[in-house]
Amino acid sequence: MHMHPVTVFLEHSDGEDMPFQPPVECPICRETLALDRTLEEHLVGSHTPLEVARQLAARHESGGLRRVSE
């Protein structure tokens, strides 16, 4: 299953909207990241370049990734 990021706006008591980003799950180890942590920080700090390359190649080969120009 492929999940897409979602932005939800919560309303402050003064009427201003505040964006809410749900937690991100690492596609390699399935760890749910802390709200103050980015996927990039997690990948660099917790996974080897080979693990990241294998995941990227597997997703590309399965059709899960498109070129940026598309």
Image (cartoon, grey):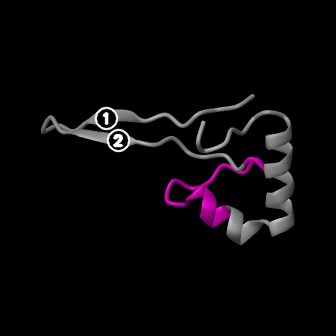
* Tag 2 residue: 19
Q: Position of residue 63 (x, y in %)?
A: 79, 33
Q: Amino acid at mark 1?
A: Leu
Residue extending farthest to the left is 14
Question: Counting residues from the N terminus, which is met first, the one under dot 1 or under dot 2?
Answer: 1
Does the stretch in magenta take in 70? Answer: no
Q: Is 37 situated above or below 23? A: below
How many C-alpha atoms fall within 10 Å of the one at disc 2: few (<14), some, or many (≥20)?
A: few
Q: Quadrant of residue 39?
A: bottom right
User: Element under label 2?
Assistant: strand
Q: Residue at x 62, y 61 (%)?
A: 40
Q: Which residue does the numbered mark 1 point to in the structure image?
A: 10
Q: CB of mark 1 within 8 Å of CB of mark 2? A: yes
The picture places residue 1, in percent across and down from the top left corner, at 75, 28
Q: Residue at x 68, y 38 (%)?
A: 66
Measured Cα–Cα span from mark 1 to mark 2? 6 Å
In front of the other: label 1 or label 2?
Answer: 2
State which region is magenta: 27-42
Residues 50 and 21: in front is 50
For residue 23, side relative to residue 66 (left or right): left
Judged left or right of residue 60, residue 70 is left
Report the amino acid beneath label 2. Answer: Pro
Q: Main secondary structure of the magenta part?
A: loop
Q: Residue at x 51, y 53 (%)?
A: 35
Above or below, comparing residue 19 to residue 34 in the picture:
above
> How far across and down, in percent of the image, does residue 31 sit?
72, 51
